[in-house]
Image: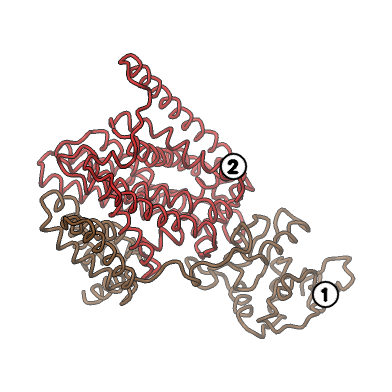
């Protein structure tokens, strides 16, 4: 690891997502510094993935070079970043007009609002930080070899070195034609090209990026989503903000389940801590949990409609990651939508939820007949 | 129908990891049952969605229609739609916070964590993680072989035959190094052709038939052959087969390069590939 690479990764996987995520926290009117930060990070990252999916799939289909796709994706990201910038400026000017400070500083435990900012909150917090950092550090510091990288990382290397996207066979490097070989299923889920774009921008070789840097940043991002899930599940109806101590204990349990969850190579723990740099693992560990979180928000009686808009973003982002995202996200939308309908009897809401599966349906159709 | 039931069951066992995953699975089922009694909101958010996923997953008809046709071999991935670890963690947290005394609650949290750890399998072990050989997290031999090939490129890429233990890693470092066959040689995802299969069969033997490997290698323009002398018993000099020893990596990976017109050991019949 060197400082330049860490800086690049921090921009690509923390600063930029957090900046773009401002769009969502402003739209959803999310309060509390910590909650706002986690939401910007997670929702911004999903937005970047969704934008990449919309750009990459047609460009892969038209055999465009990687640099061209990168230029288009950068333009989309720049536009989103400018919109976020405008929203920040507007918020600041509103606060100045009202005579409030631009940034409201709230200390971490006092946000709980349940008087839990005591000794145990800090002890649980410190313990949790150690647990999460261990989980993020070990995969980055040590080496785990996975045979599936023979396809994914090879595709990334070819893309970066040849400035192509899925043009050649990941084994022989012979030129591929449409619908050939195992690469076919990646046309609709071009996560490898997303990593190739990151590699091209940062100058970090794909194998180094995937095996050393991505685990650290993605595992932290996953725990950001898990924090939000804990908050959504544990927040009482009358509470404005999630009870911090309970969420910390929730995450502590979750960490222990993951650290001792290697009962097979297929469990969430294995995906999260053994091969998080692969699209399917990101789908299982980050995007499906994010989908749970959005549904927990939407299933509430009073909910912000922006959460439903986010379902469209997440369904696109899940498609980028893996073919299993194309299948599981619509299934989740169908199930949760049906359950919500049983409780709330709102046909409009049901249709809005189910319609979010349309992008997945289109990609599936494209895969089947393409 | 019985076949499909067995199919679903095997996918389930595949996912949880057989007996070793049974304890955590039982914990999930217990937590799921607890959700029934934790209020309407919990039932709506956690209980019913989980039950619905389970009903779909364990439905042999669904498996027959969807599982075998569209999710062959990866049907178990549908279980990612179950919030297994979230549900366990949530129920344990709720139960822990039923206890009012702080110290007792902390004790319960600690004991619960110990129970989870004791009934599960540790993920960070020497089996799953090892020391890095380099920043790429690839075998160092791969880096050295690829660097050698890149430094001596005759074309935009070279095709190599490599020992089976390097098959998955060569292409992760450079796109100048193509493989004659990859991990598909083991019947994974795609099948390979007859000549690739013949070379793979020989490379899998301790005493490979060099004639077969070199003849096919020359015919299919595999410029480099790499043998692992810790495993392969081969003659050191392969010039009579049309290949010359050019480089040794880590004392046991030996690289042979195809003799070309003008090379000292090159013979007319070999150059012609006969």
Q: Name the residue rendered at 34%, 49% in the picture.
A: A122
Chain for mark 2? A
Q: CA distance from mark 2 to mark 1?
A: 50 Å
- Chain coloured red: A
Crowdedness near tag 2: few (<14), some (14–19) or many (≥20) residues, C-alpha within 10 Å: some
The local secondary structure at tag 2 comes to helix
Identify the residue under disc 1: B269
Q: Could you say where residue A161 lies in the image, as x and y percent from the top left?
A: 64, 48
Q: Name the residue rendered at 72%, 59% in the picture.
A: B147
The local secondary structure at tag 1 comes to helix
Q: Nearer the viewer, mark 2 or mark 1?
A: 2
Q: Could you say where residue A188 lies in the image, as x and y percent from the top left?
A: 43, 48
Q: Are marks 2 and 1 in contact (CB under 8 Å)?
A: no
Q: Name the residue rendered at 44%, 50% in the picture.
A: A218
- Taking B142 as reference, is A9 above or below it? above
Quarter of image, res B260: bottom right
Chain for mark 1? B
| Residue A368 visible in the snapshot | no
- Chain coloured brown: B
- Taking A79 as reference, is B197 above or below it? below
Residue extending furthest toward the top: A97
A125 left or right, relative to A352:
right
Q: Looking at the picture, tell me which residue is in the foreground, B5 or A282.
A: A282
B195 left or right, relative to A47:
right
- Taking A8 as reference, is A84 above or below it? above
Identify the residue under disc 2: A202
Q: Name the residue rendered at 62%, 48% in the picture.
A: A2
Q: Looking at the picture, tell me which residue is in the foreground, B146 or A12.
A: A12
Crowdedness near tag 1: few (<14), some (14–19) or many (≥20) residues, C-alpha within 10 Å: few
């Amino acid at each position: 690891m060197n400082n330049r690479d860490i800086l690049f990764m921090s921009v690509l996987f923390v600063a930029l997502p957090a900046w773009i995520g401002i769009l969502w926290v402003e739209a959803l009117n999310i309060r509390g510094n910590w909650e706002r930060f986690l939401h910007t990070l997670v929702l911004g990252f999903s937005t970047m993935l969704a934008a990449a999916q919309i750009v990459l799939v047609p460009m892969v289909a038209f055999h465009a070079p990687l640099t061209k796709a990168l230029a288009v994706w950068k333009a989309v990201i720049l536009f989103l970043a400018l919109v976020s910038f405008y929203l920040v400026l507007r918020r600041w000017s509103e606060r100045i007009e009202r005579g409030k400070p631009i940034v409201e500083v709230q200390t971490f435990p006092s946000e709980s609002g349940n008087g839990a900012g005591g000794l145990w909150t800090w002890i649980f917090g410190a313990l949790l930080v150690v647990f999460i950092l261990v989980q993020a550090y070990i995969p980055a510091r040590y080496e785990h070899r996975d045979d599936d990288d023979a396809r994914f990382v090879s595709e990334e290397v070819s893309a970066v070195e040849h400035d192509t996207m899925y043009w050649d066979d990941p084994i022989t490097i012979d030129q591929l034609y449409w619908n050939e070989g195992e690469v076919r299923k990646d046309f609709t889920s071009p996560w490898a090209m997303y990593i190739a774009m990151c590699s091209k921008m940062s100058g970090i070789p794909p194998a180094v990026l995937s095996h050393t840097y991505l685990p650290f940043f993605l595992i932290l991002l996953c725990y950001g989503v898990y924090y939000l899930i804990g908050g959504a599940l544990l927040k009482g109806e009358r509470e404005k903000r999630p009870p911090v101590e309970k969420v910390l204990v929730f995450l502590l349990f979750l960490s222990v389940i993951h650290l001792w969850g290697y009962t097979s190579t297929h469990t969430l723990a294995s995906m999260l801590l053994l091969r998080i740099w692969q699209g399917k693992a990101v789908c299982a560990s980050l995007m499906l949990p994010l989908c749970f979180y959005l549904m927990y928000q939407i299933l509430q009686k009073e909910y912000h409609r922006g959460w439903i808009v986010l379902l469209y973003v997440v369904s696109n982002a899940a498609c980028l990651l893996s073919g299993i995202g194309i299948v599981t996200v619509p299934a989740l939308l169908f199930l949760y939508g049906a359950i919500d309908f049983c409780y709330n009897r709102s046909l409009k809401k049901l249709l809005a939820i189910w319609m979010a599966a349309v992008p997945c349906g289109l990609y599936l159709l494209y895969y089947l007949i393409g | 129908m019985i076949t499909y039931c067995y199919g679903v069951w095997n996918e389930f066992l595949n996912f949880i990891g057989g007996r070793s995953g049974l304890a955590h699975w039982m914990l999930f089922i217990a937590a799921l049952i607890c959700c029934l009694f934790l209020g309407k909101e919990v039932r709506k958010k956690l209980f019913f969605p989980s039950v619905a996923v389970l009903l779909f997953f364990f439905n042999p008809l669904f498996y027959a229609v969807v599982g075998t046709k569209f999710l062959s071999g990866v049907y178990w991935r549908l279980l990612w739609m179950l919030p297994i670890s979230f549900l366990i963690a949530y129920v344990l947290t709720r139960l822990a916070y039923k206890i009012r005394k702080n110290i007792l609650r902390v004790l319960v949290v600690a004991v619960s964590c110990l129970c989870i750890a004791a009934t599960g399998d540790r993920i960070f072990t020497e089996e799953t993680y090892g020391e890095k050989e380099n920043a790429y997290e690839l075998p160092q031999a791969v880096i050295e072989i690829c660097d050698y090939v890149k430094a001596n490129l005759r074309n935009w890429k070279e095709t190599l035959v490599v020992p089976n233990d390097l098959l998955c890693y060569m292409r992760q470092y450079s796109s100048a190094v193509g493989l004659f066959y990859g991990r598909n040689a083991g019947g994974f995802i795609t099948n390979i052709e007859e000549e690739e299969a013949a070379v793979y069969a020989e490379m899998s033997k301790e005493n490979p038939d060099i004639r077969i490997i070199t003849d096919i290698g020359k015919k299919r323009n595999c410029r480099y052959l790499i043998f692992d002398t810790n495993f392969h018993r081969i003659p050191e000099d392969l010039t009579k087969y049309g290949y010359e020893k050019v480089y040794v990596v880590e004392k046991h990976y030996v690289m042979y390069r195809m003799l070309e017109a003008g090379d000292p050991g090159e013979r007319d019949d070999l150059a012609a590939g006969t």
